[in-house]
């Protein structure tokens, strides 16, 4: 599959010593088919990531003096890049053969396309971790019936292509201090520019999925950031992300169950048990298709584990919502104390794009 292409491949990395060598080997194998530069932005790792990258002599390695988050690393890579087409690949991925070429071919096919992303394979390189296999399922669910491609609301930030000039026009990646949420923000900017986010089946990747505990912590941060995007666009994201209306409803029923457990100290126990059972049954109805998906790929044991894992994921989302409102209350009191009505000053990590234009 040959194309006349010039591509800048940008790999943001942070403490990636476990897999970045395999990641870069797959990229080098792929990049033989076109003219490319490979840029690794090390976000102040404290392991052997840089030592491993330095073995790849033709790779341009940029070492940041402090950790600034993946959004900053991606923007820096874009500024350094020499070519018009940017390909972002996270350092913990192993891309499949010809994936970059398929992504770029699709990007160039239609001027109304803003980004093209790969679809993750239902395959966990961290196979010894049972809970990370559940995270793999949750992250891959929604793409199993796609035959060729699908239009989505978010950009596939882990592995995607985008034109450099277009990325600059829409303001680049949001620079959160911790990873998570950038894909929703940039995906929304692309939609606002009247272009589409596409994910294709011909491009895929494997990865070491995080365990359930790490995903729980990440969901708190991601949810708090995502609510700002949600309030702007006033609708949830497409299936295949953690920010769907189905996920929100599932989280609502987990919240109901937690409320019933709390009320067990004050209400009749049979009323509480009835409420718990009803909430759980309705939640299973909403999660039924995912549970069937989990059983198909990892068996009956994973189905039962998923009933537990769903609650942990949802509790992380609930904590993220609480964190968001606590932050809003904090901003409210800071504004009163300082007599300053510029809320964006206190948001810190997220500045409403509409406010910034006013």
Image (cartoon, rainbow, N blue to C red):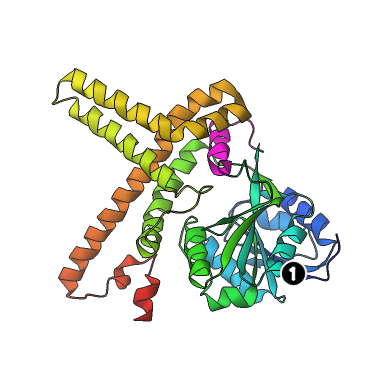
Position of residue 97 measured from the top left corner of the image (x, y, whole percent): 79, 51
Is residue 64 visible in the rendered image? The answer is: no
Q: Quadrant of residue 195?
A: bottom right
Q: Quadrant of residue 62?
A: bottom right
Residue 332 versus residue 319 in the image, above or below: below
Residue range (magenta) = 126-142
Residue 120 versus residue 134 in the image, above or below: below
Is residue 251 visible in the rendered image? The answer is: yes
- Report if residue 99 lies within the magenta region: no
Position of residue 95 measured from the top left corner of the image (x, y, whole percent): 72, 51
- Report if residue 139 lies within the magenta region: yes
Position of residue 34 measured from the top left corner of the image (x, y, whole percent): 83, 66
Q: Secondary structure at mark 1?
A: strand
**Residue beneath label 1, please?**
7
- For the stretch drawn in magenta, what is the main secondary structure? helix
Q: Which sits in the foreground, 66 or 74?
A: 74
Q: Which sits in the foreground, 341 or 112?
A: 112
């Amino acid at each position: 599959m040959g194309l006349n292409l010039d591509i800048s491949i940008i790999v943001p990395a942070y403490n990636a010593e476990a897999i970045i060598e395999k990641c870069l080997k797959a990229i080098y194998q792929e990049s033989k088919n076109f003219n490319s530069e490979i840029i690794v932005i090390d976000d102040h790792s404290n392991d052997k990531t840089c030592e491993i990258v330095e073995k790849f002599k033709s790779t341009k390695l940029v070492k940041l003096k402090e950790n600034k988050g993946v959004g900053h690393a991606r923007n820096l890579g874009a500024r350094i890049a020499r070519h018009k087409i940017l390909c972002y690949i996270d350092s913990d991925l192993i891309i499949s053969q010809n994936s970059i070429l398929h992504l770029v071919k699709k990007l160039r096919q239609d001027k109304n396309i803003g980004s093209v992303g790969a679809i993750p394979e239902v395959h966990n390189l961290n196979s010894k971790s049972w809970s990370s296999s559940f995270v793999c399922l949750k992250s891959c669910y929604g793409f199993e019936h796609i035959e060729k491609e699908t239009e989505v609301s978010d950009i596939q930030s882990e592995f995607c292509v985008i034109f450099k000039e277009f990325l600059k026009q829409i303001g680049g990646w949001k620079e959160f201090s911790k990873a998570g949420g950038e894909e929703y923000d940039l995906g929304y900017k692309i939609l606002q520019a009247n272009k589409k986010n596409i994910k294709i089946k011909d491009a895929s990747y494997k990865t070491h999925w995080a365990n359930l505990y790490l995903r729980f912590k990440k969901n708190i941060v991601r949810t708090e950031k995502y609510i700002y995007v949600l309030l702007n666009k006033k609708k949830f994201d497409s299936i295949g992300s953690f920010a769907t209306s189905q996920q929100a409803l599932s989280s609502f029923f987990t919240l109901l169950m937690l409320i019933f457990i709390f009320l067990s100290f004050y209400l009749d126990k049979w009323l509480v048990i009835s409420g718990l059972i009803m909430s759980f049954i309705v939640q299973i109805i909403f999660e039924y298709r995912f549970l069937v998906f989990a059983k198909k790929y990892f068996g009956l044991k994973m189905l039962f584990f998923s009933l537990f894992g769903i609650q942990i994921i949802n509790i992380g989302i609930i904590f993220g919502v609480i964190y968001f409102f606590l932050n809003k209350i904090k901003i409210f009191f800071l504004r009163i104390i300082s007599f300053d009505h510029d809320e964006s000053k206190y948001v810190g990590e997220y500045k409403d794009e509409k406010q910034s234009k006013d």
